[in-house]
Image (tube, rainbow, N blue to C red):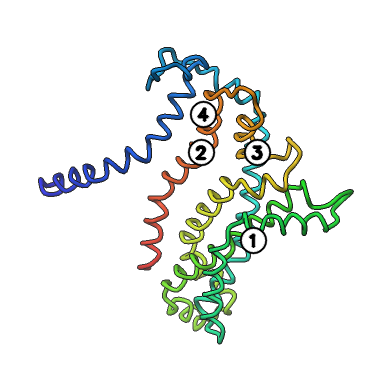
Amino acid sequence: MGRRSIRGSVLCWLVLLPLIVLVLFPFALMLSTALKSAPEVLQYPPRWLPAHIDWSTFAAMWKAAGFGTAVLNSFAISTLATALALAVSVPAAYALARLPFAAERGYRRFLLVTQMLSPVLLVLGLFRMAASVPFGSGTLVNTRLVVIVIYATFNIAFSVWMLAAYFAAIPRDLEEAAWIDGCTKLRGVIAVFLPLAVPAIAVTAIVTFVNEWNEFTVALTMLRSPEKQTITLRVVNLVAGRYSVEWNQVMAATLVATGPVALLFAWLQRYLVGGLTLGAVK
């Protein structure tokens, strides 16, 4: 590595250093608060670092909030909702990128407009719809199924918009060559197009998963039973309706809820971006 390259790398890191500090500061603050005892959290003047590291806060929080069940609920709901959203979005994005039709421009505008609607505006209507649909011995309210369907529905437009742009960049000549070699159109899509589109689908899946993992409003409205609640609801339950709040447990819960997903996204992002670049030049 030459001196010019080293200087360029150092300069880039110096430019990015304020952004790195800004991104990592909330996690450092959450960890510092989680490792403090309850009296130390409230002492004045505050201390940035704990005087005595107390790891028992995480165990106490995990037991008090029932975090194990909440993590499994969030993982199951987010995974199934992501799979459902991609099952609808991939064919729709392929049609948008490969099959021109008369209402294509209007359809794209419709997808864009749907992204401007907040779930808060629709949650009351969604609750009334779920309450009117029979399911088992009751209704869809307080079921994981309704949350999965709503999460998938909210993310379909984003997924189609994102995937269509990636799919349009994949050369059409590759599919046409497969058709000339005797592949049917469906076989060409499965054997030629989808392998090149895997990085784009993976990126979309991760972004969609993170959105669903962090969602709060729909889960709060639809899920009533504690054993069905997601991780975001359990974090709020550590604060809402309590006479005294154990802020060290709240920070520990927030760190557990956000840390693993943030690390997973940061770790996979470089490989997925590299895969997208490779797929574009094949």
Q: Residue furthest top?
A: 52
Task: Characterize the local packing of mark 1: few (<14), some (14-19) or many (20 or more) Cα atoms within 10 angstroms.
Answer: some
Q: Are marks 1 and 3 in contact (CB under 8 Å)?
A: no
**Earlier sequence position, callout 3 versus callout 2:** 3
Along the line of sight, the residue nearer the viewer: 245 or 10: 245
State the separation of the CA atoms marked 4 and 1.
Answer: 31 Å
State the separation of the CA atoms marked 4 and 2.
Answer: 10 Å
Compared with residue 272, is residue 106 higher up or lower down, i.e. above or below? below
Q: Which residue is mark 3?
A: 72
Query: Mark 3 against mark 2, which lies toward the viewer?
Result: 2
Amino acid bearing label 4: Met
Q: Which residue is mark 1?
A: 153
**Earlier sequence position, callout 4 versus callout 3:** 3
Provide the secondary structure element on which disc 4 rests. helix
Query: Mark 4 against mark 1, which lies toward the viewer?
Result: 4
Look at 51% across and 68% down and name the residue there.
161
Compared with residue 67, is residue 273 higher up or lower down, i.e. above or below? below
What is the x, y in percent for residue 102? 56, 87
